Image: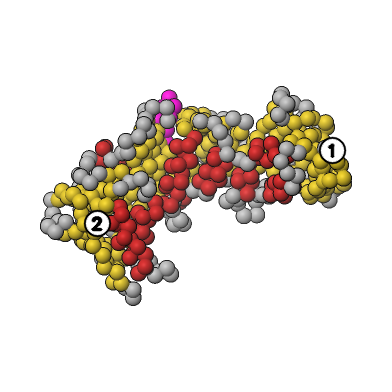
Amino acid sequence: MKFKVNANWLLNELNPVIPVATKNVLREFSNANKIEINVTDTSLKFIAFGGLVSITKTIENDSEDSYEFIEEGKVTIDALSLIDALGSFGISRNVVFSISNVDVENNTGLLRIELDTDSEQYQSISVFMDEIKLPSQIDDLKYNFKINRKLLIQAMKNISFAVGFEKDFKEFFYWRITTDKDQVRFLSGTNGRFAINTFCGSNIIESDSKVNVLLHKDTIKILSECLSFIEDETIEFTVFESKTTRQTSIKCKDYDIVIVDYDSEINLDYVNEEKILNTNPEARLTVSKIDLDSAIKGINAASDKNSLVSVDVNIDTVKKILSTKIDSQLKSNRKVQIQDLESQVDNIDFSCCAPYISEISKSYPKDSEFLQINYLGNLKPIIVFAYADKTIRSNNDLFNDKNIKEQFVVFFAPLVD
């Protein structure tokens, strides 16, 4: 194997590949933290597969900006060692890749990277003779859709805090994408609370049918970083499904990404968020996010970091005051002025896990000045909408006013006495 390439240019091309090789890799997975280089006279490929997501970067040998082919071959190396070696040559330096000291029987050898103008300046990296085996492709097409790349990255960031961890509820290890005409929704959650990010507008989704896709929670960190380095405005999702498995592929620019199959027994409709969101509330109220943030700081200060603390919430519909109270070893008692209120009941009391309230401060959009809280009734979910006004609005009006309308909402379960 031998080829010449610009070191800095190649580093930029490899940016999307590195997180796939190194982020949230499966323990003891043979391909983890590795990259395979495969060069021919027509293309240069970089392949990574950490157990959950695979990626193939293909560079066609058809322009002066690509690479100069010398001898074909392939090799597998440590991903971060490759990045460190390339970075050591500085900006705008051309380097030559070659293999030496190969011992197939003992699975050893060296990848040599040297300056094309001075062969006495070089770096060497240990190589592995094993090829990276990509996940087997499923051929039965179920869905195909295109989505705005920046919107997808934003949504993954917004809902990542709510992904589940309970071993007994495997559905909550996944986040969900659902689409409709000019609308896409992202959802994640546990048995206690869910986060929902919905976008509406033209040119954000292109699909021939309604889509319902599950992706494992550990893909969020990988995809967010990987896709942030790709410049395409839209990316294409293709979902394949057989009798036993489901698999998702993503195509953009010169990158082919495959997300491995997930448990086919999981019900894609494991939560009916529409039923909850569309339930007529017994009370609706709005509060200033800044005012609520102050109460949340008090909650955080009184919360025991090593145990789960509950918060008692009272809504005085006469005085228009929302009160939060922690009565444990450390105590907190705060009041928040209600800006607007519609209620069928005189007084509302409920308790919830302290983190569900604390998350409001750090997870809701920074440009949301007011929050709207919908109280559905005793022991029913509490719904908190971002992008509210000072005055109460209907659920369908709780969107921002940009060209691409966005709604962000969390609902959580109150504690049972």
Which residue is the extreme one toward the front?
A: 91
Read off the magenta span: 205-213
Q: Is residue 140 left or right of residue 332?
A: right
Mark 2: which secondary structure? loop
Q: Which secondary structure is most common in the magenta stretch?
A: strand
Q: In the rendering, at what x and y percent does residue 17 appear?
A: 63, 41
Along the line of sight, which residue is nearer the eye, 106 or 180?
180
Residue at the disc numbered 2: 379
Mark 1: which secondary structure? loop
Name the amino acid type tagged 1: Thr
Residue drawn at (39%, 70%) of the image = 304
Name the amino acid type tagged 2: Leu
Question: Could you tell me if residue 242 is visible in this image?
Answer: no
Question: Could you tell me if residue 141 is visible in this image?
Answer: yes
Residue at the disc numbered 1: 117
Residue drawn at (38%, 27%) of the image = 202
